[in-house]
Image (tube, rainbow, N blue to C red):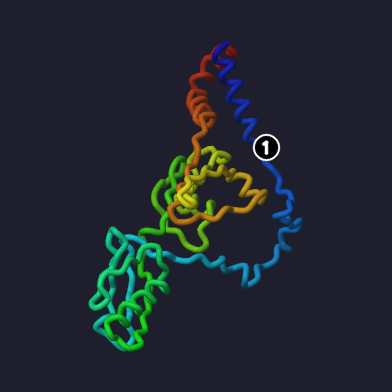
Amino acid sequence: MRKICAALLIAAALGGCAGRAQLQSTPNLTVVADASSLPAPERSDLVAADRPALIGPLDTIQVEVVNIPDFTREIQVDASGRIAMPLVGTVDARGTTAEELARAIEAALRAHSVRDPEVVVNIKSSVSQVATVDGQVVEPGLYPVTNQMTLMRAIASAKGLTEFARGEDVVILRSVKGQRMAALYNVGAIRRGIYADPAIYANDVIVVGDSPQRRLFRDLVALSPLLAAPLIAIIR
């Protein structure tokens, strides 16, 4: 009897996986009836909204002082977020944009009698602007955050969900004005366009939940040959 019940559980689980939700139009989504009529994007659609790229500890920057080649150099920001240059001294670069840091260096040079300094700062590589992707993804880890980083892109960067992932239980943790905040998202709903794919920012932590039901189903499938053999023997 126990074996028959287990077999019925497997059949029920398989039946539950058979259905597939249909795309439906919502205030935020227009479903095109004829797939061949899906229009091409406009140029503005291809550019993400600008986010300020901030400099952080251990980032590498290129500082160029126009017409003063000896001052042009590549610098790694130290662990406390500071850089040091001749005449300029120590400057706190943490949390500044490239433009803001350039203006701070110019001010320091003017204070040391450099006439009309013109400074250009570029971020060469960033290790501080990253998000953490954890939980039931194939490759948990730290991933760089760009202007176009969203929840779905972050999960794709981590090679997608595992077989045991609970797609409706995805949490984004974020600090806002020193307050720790969290929001719950449903990957399946985002895929169907029910609501927008949320933006991901530096220092966000994404945690994909675990599905005990999927693990149970895997275990039942693994047991199915053992369950089927006695049933076949009885039928014979």
Q: Left of 63 or right of it: where is 4?
A: right
Residue corresponding to mark 1: 19
Q: Is residue 59 left or right of residue 155?
A: left
Of residue 126 and residue 64, the one placed in the foreground of this image is 64
Against 21, residue 227 (above or below) is above
Q: Is residue 32 left or right of residue 153?
A: right
- Badge 1 marks a residue whose secondary structure is loop
Whole-percent x, y for residue 80 in the image: 29, 59
- Number of dots carrying numbers: 1
Residue 96 found in image quarter: bottom left
Query: Which corner quadrant holds the C terminus?
Result: top right
| Residue 107 % position (x, y) | 35, 78
Q: Nearer the viewer, residue 151 or 188?
A: 151
The amino acid type of the residue labelled 1 equals Gly
The image quadrant where one finds the N terminus is top right
- Would you say residue 159 is visible in this rendering? no
Indicate the quadrant where residue 11 lies. Answer: top right
From the top left corner, tell me how far across and down residue 177 is, in percent.
Answer: 48, 52
Question: Going by the picture, which residue comes out furthest to the right?
Answer: 33
| Residue at the (51%, 58%) spot, across then down | 149
Q: Residue at x 35, y 79 (%)?
A: 106
Give the residue drawn at x 25%, y 73%: 89
| Residue 183 locus on image (x, y percent) | 55, 44
Name the quadrant containing residue 126: bottom left
Residue 89 in sight here: yes
